[in-house]
Image: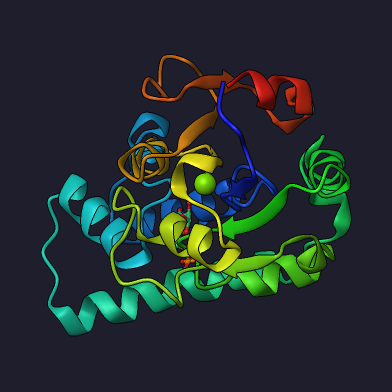
Amino acid sequence: MTDIKACIFDLDGVIVDTAVYHYKAWKRLANELGFDFTEEQNEHLKGVSRVRSLQLILGWGGVTKTEAEQEELATRKNTWYVEMINQMTPAEILPGALEFLEACRADSLKTALGSASKNSMTILNKVGIAQLFDTIVDGNHVSAPKPDPEVFLKGAEALGVSPTECVVFEDAIAGVQAAKNGGMKAVGIGSVQTLTQADLVISGLNEMSLAKLKEL
Ligand code: G6P
Ligand code: MG
């Protein structure tokens, strides 16, 4: 049992179900390029930066593009994605997320967002929960993508806590690895089969409680 002082939350697939919108937009792009990819392959895109995701997808389709073409394709995907997230409402906050964030704050635990997304502020403002985070670290502030722990270490630093005092909530394989690489506890949101490195796996934040947090 550790003295937990802070919770760091990934955004897509943990707080809101934007993982579905990322999937839809990437699938549309792949289909336009004449191929498709599986849901299992999609698991490897979670937590992965926009540029790297595109490179993985092009690789799966056996398609080669110049850097300029890649930039255009990534922008095209992001335009579709932004169209979808601009329609979001507070109803799209995943079950239990609001309640758990509020419980953490009521218990004097610090909260941070640690996301690879450059669209995180748009999403937080759309669903109205930006004020529930003491600090926000996202794709605009980091240079090394998950599984590098930079995003979470920056969050811990901004909160003034040490990595061992943090628990990270993540739905991505790369995100769980990033937390472990940073010396933090990781709670996986998803399946035990996929998130093998997590200290605890739950299906959603509605299954989380302060009691479970303190047992980690
Ligand atoms: C999150 C998602 C990824 C996404 C990445 C970048 O980590 O899980 O699927 O590619 O953010 O998001 P962005 O909104 O900047 O394209
Ligand atoms: Mg995620």
x then y, percent, for residue 12:
58, 51
- Which residue, as the protein is rendered here, is positioned at the far front? 3
Res. 198 image quadrant: top left
Reply above or below: 62 against 170: below
Q: Kindly tell me whether residue 82 is visible in this rendering.
A: yes
* Left-right relation of 30 to 209: left
- Residue plotted at (64% across, 18% down): 215
Q: Nearer the viewer, residue 118 or 22?
A: 118
Res. 95 image quadrant: top right
x then y, percent, for residue 110:
70, 53
x then y, percent, for residue 47:
42, 50
- Residue plotted at (60% across, 48% down): 9
* Left-right relation of 1 to 84: left
- Residue plotted at (80% across, 48% down): 108
* Left-right relation of 209 to 163: right
* Numbered label tally: 0
Q: Kindly tell me whether residue 87 is visible in this rendering.
A: no
Q: State the scheme by which the image is colored.
A: rainbow
Q: Nearer the viewer, residue 83 or 166?
A: 166
Res. 126 image quadrant: bottom right
On-image quarter of the C terminus = top right
Q: Nearer the viewer, residue 198 or 64?
A: 198
- Residue plotted at (57% across, 20% down): 1
Reply above or below: 131 against 177: below
x then y, percent, for residue 144:
28, 64
- Which residue, as the protein is rendered here, is positioned at the far bottom? 68
Q: Nearer the viewer, residue 143 or 165?
A: 165
* Left-right relation of 115 to 3: left
Reply above or below: 143 against 169: below
